[in-house]
Amino acid sequence: MTLHLTNARLIDPETGTDAPGALTFQDGVILGRGPAPKGAEVFDCGGMCLAPGIVDWGVKIGEPGERHKESFRSAGMAAAAGGVTTIIARPDTHPVIDMPETLAFVTRRAAENVVRIRHMAALTKGCEGQEMTEIGFLLDAGAVAFTDAFRVSTNTKALARALTYARSLGALVVGHPQEPGLSAGAVATNSKFASLRGLPWVHPMAERIGLDRDLGLVEMTGARYHADQITTARALPSLVRAKANGLDVTAGVSIHHLTLNEFDVGDYRTFFKLTPPLRSEDDRLALVQAVAEGVIDVVASFHTPADEESKRLPFEEAASGAVGLQTLLPAALRLVHSGDMDLPTLWRALSLNPARRLGLPQGRLAEGAPADLVLFDPDAPFVLDRSKLLSKSKNTPFDLMRMEGKVLATWVAGVQVHKG
């Protein structure tokens, strides 16, 4: 079937344009723009925004081991409802995805999902930072990148060996820039607010120290490297220098660190307990500027489902993380409504850049690109009700907040997988 999407506001991050237009796709591939081909079915977009589907990098899915928190099916439904057409899943499951057999299992489980799901594999066995995994075999099995997720290795020599081996195979390594000793046990950022609340804190320098170590190893080994979350202003100069020196380095940031700050924790609200912890307002503003200027390349949800029992605990004991597949788009649109960036710039970080860094064809509206698309109304207001989220877990910090931006339709490979 040939489908012609007309009367659309095309958001093209590749060309940086935001303009009225039409788009035609057939057999899951974009044919181009212009008038409707003969015999095509016409879909009126009503002047709403049509953009490439979001590529959400760093999603935690509970399979295997924690299916009660999130399954492939529930994650896929939430993603489609949120305009996410490609999920890049983390390997920190139970068991860890550190063997080709485990990767093959989750790949089969994800194959029939309504959205695309690609997996990262562990860099070291058990994500323990000691012995590297079989990176070559895992690449052959379909791993798109290698990471130990939020577990930071203290064995620098073992990490250097893994980076060297990854470099020889052209594999992308994803690091979590935190100094593990300073960060251990911390649930808040060093500030008067954290002291008054009696919360164990970590200084923002822990992030820069961790990033500097990783960048030093990247310079030594020549590996391809992506910092999963930059959350402090202090880390940005190191990132800028690394890029200026020609290192093959990119970086991401969580949507929660772009739209929330340390004061949102309030009276120990555990839905705001994240890894890394929420930062100061000055840090948040610096990160928003870094995304707008392209210093930070990727914006992601870092979707981390947690059940009610693990969140309804004292703040220090509660599980870290928040769901974000379904809330990423409206939360990100806050940056547009505040005037900090335009839609093509935002979509560059949400879709084009992650797809390019991972070597995927998504994230574009060009002829020949996959017809992975999201149609949304950027100005539609609503109050978020977490009970209506499609994820199995409902641990969102945006519960009962006023938001703007509703997904009207989502297509994956030319098939409509969500109708708003």
Image (spheres, helix red, strand yellow):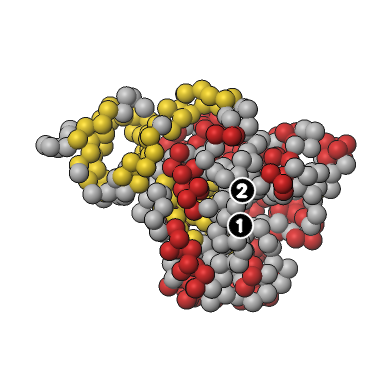
The three-letter amino acid code for the residue at tag 2 is: Pro
Q: Say left or right for 271 vs 101.
A: right
Q: Which mark is residue 165?
A: none
**Which is more toward the observer, 383 or 202?**
383
Q: What residue is rendered at 37% in x and 50% in y?
A: 362
Foreground tag (2 vs 1): 1
The answer to whether residue 236 of the structure is visible from this angle is: no
In the image, residue 112 sits, relative to residue 409, either above or below, namely: below
In the rendered image, which residue does mark 1 sit on? Answer: 66
In the rendered image, which residue does mark 2 sit on? Answer: 305
Displayed quadrant of residue 127: bottom right
> How far across and how far down the image is residue 343, in percent?
45, 33
In the image, residue 354 sits, relative to residue 225, either above or below, namely: above
> How far across and how far down the image is residue 152, in percent?
69, 63
Mark 2 near mark 1, Cβ–Cβ under 8 Å? yes
Quick one: label 1, few (<14), some, or many (20+) residues within 10 Å?
some
Q: What residue is rendered at 52% in x and 40% in y?
A: 390
> How far across and how far down the image is residue 414, in percent?
29, 45
**Which is more toward the observer, 367 or 127?**
127
The quadrant of the picture occupied by the N terminus is: top left
Q: Earlier in the sequence, mark 2 or mark 1?
A: 1
The three-letter amino acid code for the residue at tag 1 is: Glu
> How far across and how far down the image is residue 75, in percent?
50, 48
